[in-house]
Amino acid sequence: MNLFQYISENYNKIIDLCMEHFFLFLFSLIITTIVGIAISIFATEEGKENIGKIIVSVTGAAQAVPSIAVIALVFIFVGIGKPPAIIALIVYGLVPIIFNSTSGILSVPREIIEAGKGMGFTKRQVLWKLKIPIAIPVIMGGIRSTATIIIGTAVIASVIGGGGLGDLIFVGLKLNRPSVLIVGAALSAIMAIIIDHILAYIEKLITPKGLKVKR
């Protein structure tokens, strides 16, 4: 069966798996972003800078851990199905968001913070009006990295019942059907590219004028 024949005969199934993969990604990304930024904010409060630096070091090293190792650990302790797959995606996706968010907030110049305090800003105002806006490019870099990681890792998570496009890839491998494998792999890559462009556009919109977005 050639590629185009497979797509025409399994169009509805492919669309369903795409939607399943997307919602698996979206739910995991939202939770990961909220939790990751919350941890970074907590770790970068005044008086806790050392904790923040430790977190940066630990998460920096943790980025070397293979995604399959995280999925395997979750499988051992939680089992199979979509909930364990989502847990694995959240745990693995936290690393770049925490690393970037913590690094970005800690890198805000001290003189800017002191200037804000001199203007009568409270701790909350310093955080949301100075630290977060200045750190936005770095934070968004972490979110974009996490988005790509989650989309790719969700493919592997299908081995523990995550579903999505990974099902096509593993079926293609198991049954030696290149057309099925190519569809799953190509759609995963396209989804990652589209999501990254969307997040890049959002980053451009929310980055304060005058701040250069580093690539």
Image (cartoon, rainbow, N blue to C red):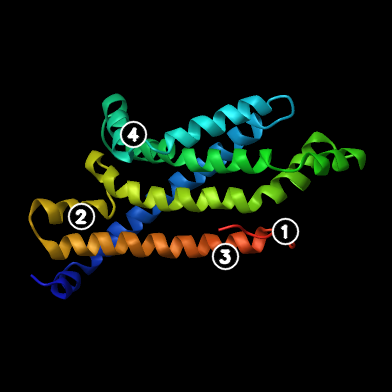
Closest to the camera, between mark 2 and mark 1, is 1
The x and y percentages for residue 168 are: 20, 56
The residue under label 4 is: 70
- Tell whether 159 sits left or right of 51: left
The residue under label 3 is: 201
* Label 2 or label 1, whichever comes before in sequence order: 2
The residue under label 2 is: 169
The reply to whether the C-beta atoms of the residues labelled 3 and 1 are less than 8 Å apart is no
Q: Residues within 10 Å of mark 2 (few under 14, many from 20)?
A: many
- Tell whether 2 sits left or right of 203: left
Amino acid type, residue under disc 4 in the picture: Val
Q: Nearer the viewer, residue 163 or 133?
A: 133
The x and y percentages for residue 48 are: 68, 25
Amino acid type, residue under disc 1 in the picture: Pro
- Secondary structure under tag 1 reads loop
* Label 2 or label 4, whichever comes before in sequence order: 4
The reply to whether the C-beta atoms of the residues labelled 2 and 1 are less than 8 Å apart is no
